[in-house]
Amino acid sequence: MADIIPFAFVLFSIISISYAVPRSVTIRNDLGTGLVLLFHCLSADDDLGNRFLPPGESWEFHFNTRSVGNTLFHCGFKWALADEKKFSVYDDNQHRYTCSQCVWSIQRNGTCLTSDAITASLCYPWSPGWPTPTPDGENTS
Ligand SMILES: *[C@@H]1O[C@H](CO)[C@@H](O)[C@H](O)[C@H]1NC(C)=O
């Protein structure tokens, strides 16, 4: 019996490791007309701080998700006099199968997601009180 426990621990560790999925999220400033994009991204565990992107530039961050549990990163975006727009740039519930490399193009009229796993980009126009977008276009607050 005592011999089984270390073996079970090793087996459990191997299974756990095999389920880690490396992912990345890229934010691209496609606002145009020389506008600087200010943003702040965070998850329950990580605060990625206040950042900015000059016109046309991109920034990306990397993280791992696991088969168990839920990873969620959300960001707030601001430019010029526009109200802050917040949404989930990665949520296991929405993006587990639709992106391991998620690219968000931030535009003045909305945001578009392209990824390694979808052929067309998914666009979500901003609306007043901008809710969290979901891949099927359904709105949840
Ligand atoms: C914003 O407008 C441009 C040009 O009309 C269009 O190509 C783009 O898909 C729009 N973006 C969103 C998020 O609706």
Image (cartoon, rainbow, N blue to C red):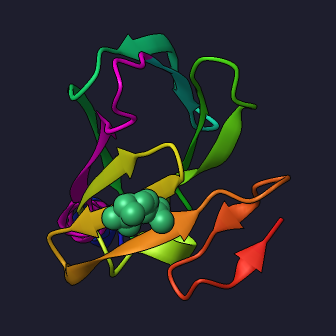
| Quadrant of the rendering where the C terminus is positioned | bottom right
Q: How many labels does the image show?
A: 0
Q: Where, by quadrant of the figure, is residue 120 drawn?
A: bottom left
Looking at the picture, does residue 130 appear above or below residue 74?
below
**Left or right side of 4 for 75:** right
Furthest residue in direction front, as rendered: 33
Q: In which quarter of the image is residue 11?
A: bottom left
**Residue 104 x %, y %:** 35, 51
Residue 67 place in picture, x, y as percent? 40, 72
Q: Does the magenta stretch include residue 18?
A: yes
What x and y, as percent, mark residue 8?
30, 70
Vertical relation: 90 (above or below) 108: below
Residue at the spot 43% in from the left edge and 45% down from the top edge:
107
Q: Along the line of sight, which residue is nearer the eye, 30 or 70?
A: 30
Q: Is residue 48 visible?
A: yes
Residue displayed at 67% across by 43% down = 86
Left or right position of 19 against 133: left
Residue name at image x 76 percent, y 55 percent: 130
**Ligand 1 image-quadrant field:** bottom left
Query: What are the residue bounds of the magenta stretch?
Result: 9-36
Residue 69 is at least partly visible in this image: no
Relative to 103, residue 100 above or below: below
Q: Is residue 124 above or below residue 81?
A: below
The residue lying toward the viewer, choosing from 19 and 45, is 45
Q: In the rendered image, which quarter is residue 93 located in?
A: bottom right
In the picture, measured across the screen, residue 58 lies left or right of residue 109, that is left
